[in-house]
Amino acid sequence: MDPTPIQRLPRYIALALFTLCACSPQPAGDILLITVDTLRPDHLGLYGYERAASPNIDHHFSDAAIFERAYATNANTSPSIASILTGQLPHEHGVRKFYQLVSDDVRLVTDLLPAAYQTAAFVSSIVLTDEAMGMARHFDHYDDHVDEVASNLRIFERKGSRTTDAALLWIAEHRDPERPLFLWMHYMDPHPPYQPPSPEYASFEHEGFVKFDRKRINPYQLEPGVDDALDYVDRYDEEIAHMDTAVGRLLTGYGVQRELDEALLIFVADHGESMLERERWFTHGYQVFEEIIRVPLMIRGPGVEPGRRDALVSGIDLVPTILHFAGARPDTALNGVALQQRTAIPKDRTVFAEGGGGKSLIRAAIRNDQKWVAKAGAGKKKTRSRWHFDLGADPAEQKPQPWDPSNPEEVARELIDLFDRDPDPGGLPKGFREGLRIDAPKVAPRADAETIERLRALGYVE
Ligand SMILES: [Zn+2]
């Protein structure tokens, strides 16, 4: 067989050409993806909260693109985080449950980025450990130590301050200065139970009184001696304040070595949390009300148009945004859109969100200010209840309206189609691989005195 033209060239020229062709454009720079568990947008200063629960985040993201209507794809951590990392809806990436391993054919953003990227993750939740979800193989470094039992239900977490410590130590000692960095941080502090590490963090106090009702909250949220439900809101905000300090230290510490303004910074939550809006207090997972599925989303960095945005956006938009920044073209079809430019987001798009607790799947389709909701039993495709909210006239979702089944609107039909196309009816995965619930906590390496000294010399620790 005749040699191809490239084979006839001297080897060094052919190699140089190959290198030119095979590589995507020079990667743009570092990417910091910060996800926070259970964080409502309306408890952050940049989203109008009157309490000073988030001074560091407010400072670092004041010039960001601030998305006022961002939705999680799912009201539970594992499916929502899998969407943020894959750019796919839960029925596409397949993660529907806690302790379900990501299947081998699923590719995360780290697999789609140019090979030049060094990739590291620091997570704080038991459900994101490698044993639980099996994602470590997609990162050069995956630190998933969780070392505190947050409740008698053995919800293990790592406090945000210690997750930041672990990341700063790794950055000082292992980050390759020749390579751009993709860093994913997951902070769990605002997740129940609300147990802030007081008294070092701001202690919030409220006016008024709401009689505590133990029937309305999960047993693991019960705190002895509390008879005012508003105390729980104070504790939730103190957890946010702790997380905020940890995020501030991370960004300041990162800035010691690299220029923060040259990096793409994304701040997002995996889902929200109910406060006192309706029957169930201080929870998430089972419902798709706005307080549960709306999340804060802020993005800043080169190429990002700052300012407030009211377009509907979703967790599936973050992978396209990251790949756009890195100059990488995904070889798979992604339904999300890169969010850098205001005009790139279609005006009348539909976003989907879901929730469920194993017995049923509840789904919402939102377009403009209209929201359609339907529910199916586990293992069943057929929806058994359907309702509709006009978010413009009824933003608190107090007046559900029935669908007209004889004449469903286009978006309602899209929602029913989604149930039909779902390979796991009712959100119940068939033949999934179960991850391991870890019974013994993995203890995070604590910084020894010498390391602390070294970090201090580098300017990481005051
Ligand atoms: Zn979560």
Image (cartoon, helix red, strand yellow):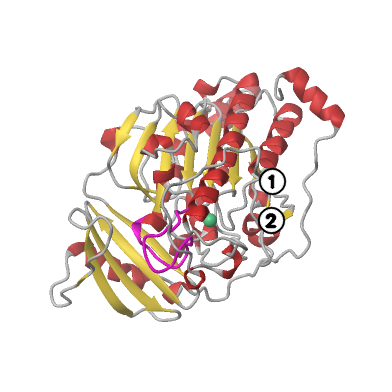
**Label 2 neighbourhood size at 10 Å, few (<14), some (14-19), many (20+)?**
many
Q: Residues within 10 Å of mark 1 (few under 14, many from 20)?
A: some
Q: Which residues are magenta?
A: 270-290
- Residue in the image at 45% along x and 60% along y: 75
Residue at image position (17%, 70%) is 408
Question: Quick one: 84 or 107, which is closer to the camera?
Answer: 84
Circles 2 and 1, Cβ within 8 Å, touching? The answer is: yes
Mark 2 or mark 1: name the one nearer the start of the chain: 2
- Which corner quadrant of the image does residue 413 belong to? bottom left
Residue that label 1 marks: 142
- The type of residue carrying mark 1 is Tyr
Picture quarter containing residue 421?
Answer: bottom left
Q: Which mark is residue 130?
A: 2
Q: Report helix, strand or loop for mark 1.
A: strand
Vertical comparison of 48 with 363: above or below: above
- Image quarter where the C terminus lies is top right
Q: Quadrant of the N terminus?
A: top right
Pinpoint residue 401: horizontal percent, then vertical percent. Answer: 20, 70
Magenta stretch prevailing secondary structure: loop
Locate residue 320, reporting x and y percent: 42, 42
Instruction: Identify the secondary structure beneath mark 2.
Output: helix
The residues tagged by marks 2 and 1 sit, at their Cα atoms, a distance apart of: 8 Å
Point 64% across, 20% down: residue:
256
In the image, what residue type sits under mark 2? Answer: Asp
Residue 134 x %, y %: 66, 58
